[in-house]
Image (cartoon, rainbow, N blue to C red):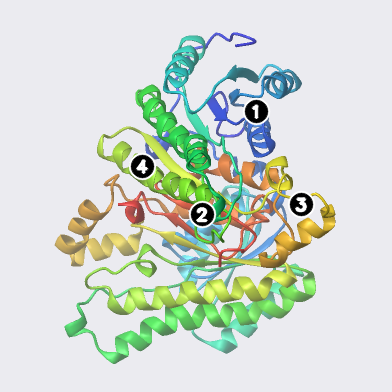
Amino acid sequence: MGSVDKKVALVTGGAGGIGSAIVELLAQNGAIVIIADTDHNKGYALAEEIGQQAVYLPLDVTVENQWLKALETVLLKFGQLNILVNNAGFLEPSELDETSLALWQQTMAVNANSVFLGCKYGVKAMKKTGGAIVNMASAAVPRPGTTFLAYAAAKAAVISLTKTVALHCAHNNYDIRCNVVLPGAVDTNMLRNNKKQDQSDEDFISNVIVRYPIGRIGQPADIAEAVLFLVSDDSAFMTGAELRVDGGSTI
Amino acid sequence: MTTPRVFDGTALEHGNKSTQQTPRLLEMCGLDSKVAIITGATSGIGRGCAEAFAAAGAIVVATGRKKAQGAKTVRLIEKNGGAANFLQQDVTNQQDWTRVVKQTVEMHGKIDVLVNNAGDSVIRPLEQLDGATMRFLIGINLNSPFLGIKAVWPFMKEAGGGVILNTNSVAGQMGTAVGSAYNASKGAQGALTKVAAIEGAPFNIRVNSVHPGFILTEGMKETLQRNSNTLQSMINSMVPTRETGRPSHIGYAMVYLASDAARYITGVECNVDGGITAA
């Protein structure tokens, strides 16, 4: 009986580590969740596991046409869209001199172009009924280090875009709020893929948490709770805001 | 799409205009039976926080200087089935802090949350601002949260953790005309919050600040009457949604940050400001 009861939510990257936690928590709180992803196996499996509250929708978030078709389908089948979570992301760390233009562009496309397209067409779909948008940035934005390069730059674009979208909706009197979450290191495949071949899991994690005053990495549920807060009426006066969920690593 | 669903046509409300939606406070078991001291809870944002915490299952120790107003906060909470008591307190006084903490532990056995909410503001251009006003605002907005943090720290350390939340302001994050001493005191409070977060992390003490924008409290209504042109034009020019918020909006953010759902959040600034700092 949460305040997302019966709301229609679309979560991009919904089959991934953080995405699936968001999908599950929204569904638990009564939302109808559209899992948008390119991993069809994982996506269909998650939808089946959750049951009636969830459906899978294949969506490449970098392709404008697919966004158009996806939101058309959502409105046709469900009548409205109330919640959009732009969570899909892509991370391949590399140093400046090793970063190809192709990698930069791919990182920008999956992390930033996707959010632009999602917000542009999402706002169109939501403006009649109102709603909430949450974008996923990263604690890497204030503290990029040297290898998060393209990823941190793309996530910085997401933060700026979040504010623009929030203002746009306020100025046009659309009842749509737009906020952004900045996760720190979260225990997902995307994080663990950065482990070196000869490195142990414990060694990898302990290197990561050196900069985390709280002394552990985050869990997907931590991010899901932040998203739920930001799409529910508990945050009704919040828009254009950044919420860091990062174990104190950016203090 | 795997399973087509037919929308049932139920009307839905959103955003600020929604008053009927029930927030999920009551579902957040993280505050069940938690003991929360909330200063400046005799009115305005403090009362809003006290009501929100009580609705989420916490045992509220509301503090402030005005007994009658404090009693009213307790009555409002009890009327809604919540648990609260009022302790008279001057937050600038260290002995008062010692007494409040001691009485809270005697009555309730522990302190899980401290909300340093008591604060004050003075709107005055630099040229007319005197040292006494600066000292006053530093005293209430910086020194008092400092005393509060120090007072609860040993209890929270020994108990294995706790949460401290400081009511800050958008003023602590930006420069605004006629705010000098107020902005400075809130900016300083923000820095204090961050240090406390780093020092508290090894002891599972999380410390965060909430930054309200313009919240329509009795205090703000009075200020609007005294300085109507200044404040109203500030609201119109600074707030993208051109709305003021409610004390409950701050309360909900505080409840979330105090709860187990926010266990990975420390040292952050949470803006509840209708878009002011995005504009």
Q: CA distance from mark 3 to mark 4?
A: 40 Å
Give the side of residue B77 with respect to residue B105, left or right: left
On the image, numbered disc 3 is attached to which residue?
Answer: A196
Closer to the eye: label 4 or 1? 4
Closer to the eye: label 4 or 2? 4
Relative to B31, say whether A34 is above or below. Answer: above
Amino acid bearing label 2: Gly
> Which quadrant holds residue A165?
top left
Protein chain holding label 4:
A
Relative to A108, say whether B178 is above or below. Answer: below
On the image, numbered disc 1 is attached to which residue?
Answer: A27
Amino acid bearing label 3: Lys
Amino acid bearing label 1: Ala
On the image, numbered disc 2 is attached to which residue?
Answer: B251
Residue B147 locus on image (x, y percent): 56, 83
User: Given contact means CB atoms under 8 Å apart, are the residues at marks 1 and 2 in contact?
Assistant: no
Residue B19 locus on image (x, y percent): 43, 37
Q: CA distance from mark 1 to mark 3?
A: 36 Å
Are labels 3 and 2 on one chain? no
Closer to the eye: label 3 or 4? 3
